Amino acid sequence: MNILQAIDDAAVFRPLLRDPETWAAWRAFLAALFALPMDDDQLATYQSCTGRIEPPTSPATEAWLVIGRRGGKSFVLALIAVYLACFRDWRASLAPGERATVMVIAADRRQARTIMRYVKGILGAVPMLSATVEAERQEAVDLNNRVTIEVHTASFRTVRGYTIVAALLDELAFWIIDEDSS
C-alpha cells in the first residue's frame, strides 16, 4: 500500500483528515516524494510549485519544503513517519537484535513533543496500527516490526549511534546554528 492509498483508505489514514479537499497540494507533494502516479491536477500543482515539467520517476531521498505557519507540515511529517515505520519492511537491512529508527528532529523539545503527540495520535486512532505498538515512551514509540519512531532535538549529541532509516527534520530554518552545531 502506498502512502496515497493509505490516505484514501477508511481503515488507515482517511478518518484522520478533517477536510480531504484541503489535502490536494499535500497529495501532489506525497505523490512526487514517493514517485507515485499523478493525476492531471497533481501534475499541475507539482509543475507550478517546482517549475519542473516531468514528475519524478524514483522516490526522493531528500526533500526541502518552504511552508508557512499552520500549513500542516508537522502533521504531515508525523504521517510520513508513521507510514515509513508501519508500511515499509526494514528488516532485511537490520542485524539480529537491531532496530530501525525513523527519527524526527525538531528545533526544540516543545516542537518535538508536538510531533510525537501527532505520531501517537495517528497510531492510536488506527486500530491496525495501534496493534503494532509494543512500547510507548515520552519521546519514542517501539513497533513490533523492529522499528522505533523517535523525536529528538537538533543536537549532534542526541542523534549518534542509531540505525536511521529515515530522518525527518522539522523547522530546519529555525535550528540554532553555531560552530558546535555541525
Image (spheres, rainbow, N blue to C red):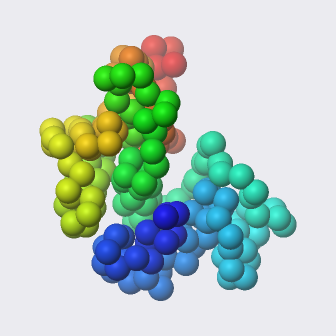
The image shows residue 101 at horizontal and vertical percentages of: 38, 34
The image shows residue 23 at horizontal and vertical percentages of: 49, 76
Residue at position x 21%, y 58% in the image: 130
Q: Nearer the viewer, residue 92 or 118?
A: 92
Q: Is residue 5 visible?
A: yes
In the image, is 177 to the left or to the right of 18?
right
The image shows residue 103 at horizontal and vertical percentages of: 39, 37
For the view shown, which residue lies furthest in the top direction? 180
| Residue 175 sits in quarter | top left
In the image, is 150 to the left or to the right of 167?
left
**On screen, 129 above or below 44?**
above
Residue at position x 36%, y 70% in the image: 13
| Residue 91 sits in quarter | top left
In the image, is 31 to the left or to the right of 140?
right
**On screen, 89 above or below 125?**
above
Residue at position x 63%, y 42% in the image: 61
Q: Is residue 81 visible?
A: no
Residue at position x 45%, y 45% in the image: 89
For the view shown, which residue lies furthest in the right direction? 53
Q: How many marks?
A: 0
**On screen, 105 above or below 111?**
above
The image shows residue 51 at horizontal and vertical percentages of: 79, 63
